[in-house]
Amino acid sequence: MYVAACLQLRTGADIPLNLDRLEALAERAAGTGAALIATPENTTFLGPSAQKVAIAEPLDGRTHRRLATLARNLRVHLLVGSVAERLDDTRCYNTSLLFGPTGDLLARYRKIHLFDIDLPGGPTFRESAHIAPGDDVVAVPTPLGVIGLSICYDLRFPELYRKLVDAGAEILTVPSAFTLQTGKDHWHPLLRARAIECQSWVLAPAQEGRHDDQGLRHSYGHALIADPWGTVVAECGDGEGFCLAEIDLERVRRVRAAIPVEQHRRLN
């Protein structure tokens, strides 16, 4: 059993400022004893999507090395919800990075499902205009359990989470920047559904509040942790902060033994 923390941030386009605020919040979370700290989607930059390509870095870039140093200094597993990973001059990847307590990069996950939507009465988003989709399903064995990686809009595609569980995942991470309009109706039901159907812990760090990209982005917040029964055991309120919960992997085994859906599956 160990403590996990989900951070709630309000990131903007100022990368050094974002990193300073992240580090201060992560240090506070580590000070409570958290062994796993998870940050939201767009941790290092949330601004105009075209600009994201310009600031994108390779995985060994300066910003990503600073994140590795943070994990090493705090001696925690650090799930950085997403960064802009360089691809070429027109597109980048939206990538989660999982660092170990030594600062080693344990895994990277490139967001598969891209946010191309027209909200009724709201803004239009075309993530695919500047982001390339990933292809790989990523479940990472760690001393804290097998961690399955996903990002934000992936949450609406349960087949991904089924594949993660098939790969051994016990903990599902869903770092997000859910819009206010969709989040108020869909955030909690979708996260609880993934926890219930996958019988897994769900860690959902989140962006919150108005960002500085011309006032177009307003994130819902409510970073939370749900247990394998689908109960929300920790949740953030307004503003930046973090929520904490004890992660008990025996809880996964007990729930899966009580309702053995894996044995009852008829369709694949």
Image: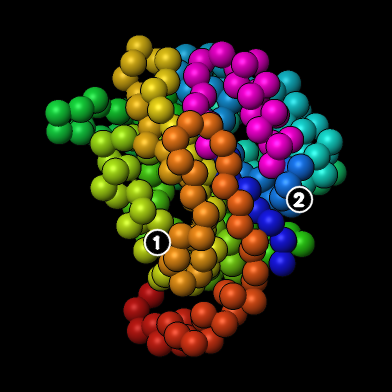
| Magenta stretch: dominant secondary structure | helix
Front tag of 1 and 2? 2
Q: Which residue is mark 2?
A: 33
Q: Secondary structure at mark 2?
A: loop
- Amino acid at the residue labelled 1: Arg
Residue 47: horizontal and vertical position, in percent?
Answer: 45, 18
Q: Quadrant of residue 112?
A: top left
* Quadrant in the picture for residue 55: top right
Q: Which x, y percent locates residue 149?
A: 55, 52
Q: Quadrant of the C terminus?
A: bottom left
Question: Which amino acid does the dot numbered 2 rest on?
Answer: Gly
Q: Is residue 16 above or below residue 232?
A: above
Alpha carbon of mark 1 to alpha carbon of mark 2: how far? 26 Å
Determine whether, in the image, residue 133 is placed left or right of residue 7.
left
Q: Quadrant of the N terminus?
A: bottom right
Q: Nearer the viewer, residue 89 or 187?
A: 187
Question: Badge 1 local density, few (<14 within 10 Å), some, or many (20+)?
Answer: many
Disc sitting over residue 252 in the figure: none
Residue at x 48% of width, y 31% of height: 239
Look at mark 1 in the image and give the residue it sits on: 192
Secondary element at image label 1: helix
Q: Position of residue 9 (x, y in %)?
A: 53, 31
> Is 143 positioned to the left or the right of 217 in the image?
right
Q: Where does residue 120 sit, x and y in percent of width and height? A: 15, 33
In this view of the protein, which residue sits in the foreground, 59 or 229?
229
Q: Which residues are magenta?
A: 8-29
Would you say 101 lies left or right of 203 here?
right
Q: Is residue 175 above or below residue 264?
A: above
Magenta-drawn stretch contains 51 = no
Q: Residue at x 69, y 42 (%)?
A: 29
Residue drawn at x 80%, y 32% is 69
